[in-house]
């Protein structure tokens, strides 16, 4: 198709016709000087426009019908042709026609003027506006923040909402992503990368995709896991995988820093005693939507992640713990507590026996 279009353009490509076509095509509000088109140039321009805007779009993929104005970060790689750029922009919903984009570039002599780098675009742009952004606009440094306690799904949804990657692409990669030996392979694990993507603020320059973002986050986790932390885990007879799994439970249970070492100590003690951890977040992890209060029926869900039904740790982490939660597991508090419950404001109350715990539950809930 593009070869035939090139033939048409070459036939029409003299200065007079080109300027005429540009004037008709560009219209108002462009940096090009407007001209009145007469006679044969007008007919030729009209013919080209009919091909570009009427005939060709009928043979293209369906136009984007989703919501307009959704942020999309798009990276132009060195050496990309306008045809390749248009195809990717169309696939991501930025423009409604890759062919219109190609003709806009050709008619205005922009084929070799698109800059390399990452640009902040949005869905539903006109081919002209998108092209002018790539030619005249500024490249951007992308910054995004992943809070402590985000799960793989939370991270994927955050990245998609900021126009960085498709959530499903990120989730699919996370299922089998094991960049380091301590990311162990266990049965029934939902996402291999869960817990090993460090929560932090990130900046991206240049080309990126879901794989690159995941790699950045995993590398950051590996840097944050210092030699002292690894040595301390070994002293406690904890593997890194067990450390991160425990820290993810602490991250989801503790609202205040002072609670982290206490909750970590309770979990470690329960593991030693062979008691179920009975951590609500492990059940919440199984639900499509979080609940303010779990029902008794929720605690009966049949899953290895359900720490009400199973003794020991879940198959793997349930979220990304921050440094504070990792350190809490490595340096737990020294108390006699064995139970805890949180009120509506996230304040925890502790007990050494079950009767006192039930009394606290009635009091705070």
Image: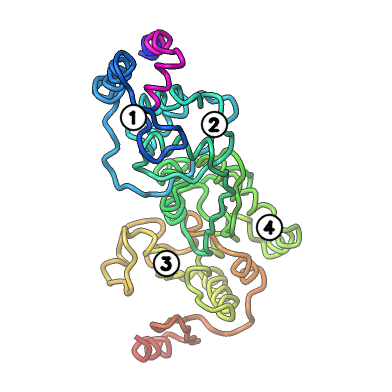
Tag 4 or tag 3, which sits nearer the N-term?
A: 4
- Tell me if residue 173 can be seen: yes
Q: Residue at x 48, y 60 (%)?
A: 150
Dot 2 surroundings within 10 Å: few (below 14), some, or many (20 or more)?
many
Q: Give the labeled residue for mark 4.
A: 225
Q: Are marks 1 and 2 in contact (CB under 8 Å)?
A: no
Residue 22 sits above or below residue 292 on the image: above
Instruction: Out of 133 and 245, give the one closest to the viewer.
Output: 133
* Mark 4 or mark 2, earlier in chain: 2
Q: Which numbered disc, 4 or 2, marks the residue closer to the eye? A: 2
CA gap, disc 3 and disc 1: 46 Å
Q: Disc 1 to disc 2, how far (Cα)?
A: 18 Å
Q: Are marks 3 and 1 in contact (CB under 8 Å)?
A: no
Q: Residue at x 37, y 13 (%)?
A: 5
Magenta span: predominant SS is helix
Which segment did they paint magenta? 6-22
Residue 202: image quadrant is bottom right
Q: Residues within 10 Å of mark 1 (few under 14, many from 20)?
A: many
Q: Earlier in the sequence, mark 1 or mark 2?
A: 1
Residue where numbered disc 2 is placed: 114
Q: Nearer the viewer, mark 4 or mark 1?
A: 1
Residue 116: x, y in percent?
A: 59, 34
Tell me the element at label 1: loop
Query: Which label is found at residue 97?
Result: 1
Mark 3 and mark 2: Cα distance apart in space: 49 Å
Kind of element beneath mark 4: loop
Neighbour tally class for label 3: few under 14, some 14-19, many 20 plus, Cα within 10 Å = many
């Amino acid at each position: 198709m593009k070869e035939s279009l090139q033939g048409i353009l070459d036939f029409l490509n003299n200065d007079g016709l080109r300027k005429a076509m540009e004037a008709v095509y560009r219209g108002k509000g462009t940096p090009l000087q407007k001209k009145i088109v007469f006679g044969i140039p007008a007919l030729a321009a009209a013919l080209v426009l009919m091909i570009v805007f009427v005939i060709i779009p009928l043979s293209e993929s369906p136009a984007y019908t989703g919501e307009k104005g959704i942020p999309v970060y798009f990276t132009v790689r060195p050496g990309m042709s306008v045809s390749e750029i248009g195809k990717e922009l169309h696939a991501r919903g930025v423009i409604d026609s890759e062919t219109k984009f190609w003709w806009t570039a050709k008619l205005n002599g922009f084929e070799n003027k698109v800059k390399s780098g990452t640009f902040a675009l949005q869905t539903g742009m006109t081919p002209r506006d998108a092209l002018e952004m790539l030619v005249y606009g500024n490249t951007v440094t992308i910054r995004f923040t992943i809070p402590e306690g985000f799960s793989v799904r939370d991270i994927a949804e955050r990245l998609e909402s900021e126009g960085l990657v498709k959530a499903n692409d990120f989730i699919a990669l996370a299922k089998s992503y094991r960049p380091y030996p301590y990311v162990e392979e266990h049965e029934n694990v939902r996402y291999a990368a869960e817990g090993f993507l460090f929560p932090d603020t990130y900046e991206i320059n240049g080309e990126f995709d879901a794989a690159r973002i995941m790699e950045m986050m995993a590398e950051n986790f590996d840097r944050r896991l210092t030699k002292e932390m690894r040595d301390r885990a070994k002293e406690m007879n904890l593997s890194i995988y067990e450390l991160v799994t425990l820290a993810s439970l602490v991250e989801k249970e503790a609202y205040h820093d002072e609670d982290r070492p206490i909750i970590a100590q309770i979990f470690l003690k329960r593991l030693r005693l062979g008691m179920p951890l009975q951590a609500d977040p492990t059940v919440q992890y199984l639900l499509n939507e979080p609940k303010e209060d779990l029902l008794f029926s929720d605690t009966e869900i049949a899953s290895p992640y359900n720490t009400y039904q199973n003794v020991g740790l879940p198959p793997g982490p349930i979220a990304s713990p921050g440094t504070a939660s990792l350190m809490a597991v490595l340096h737990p508090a020294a108390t006699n507590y064995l139970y805890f419950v949180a009120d509506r404001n996230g304040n925890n109350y502790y007990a050494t026996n079950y009767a006192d715990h039930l009394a606290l539950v009635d009091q705070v809930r």
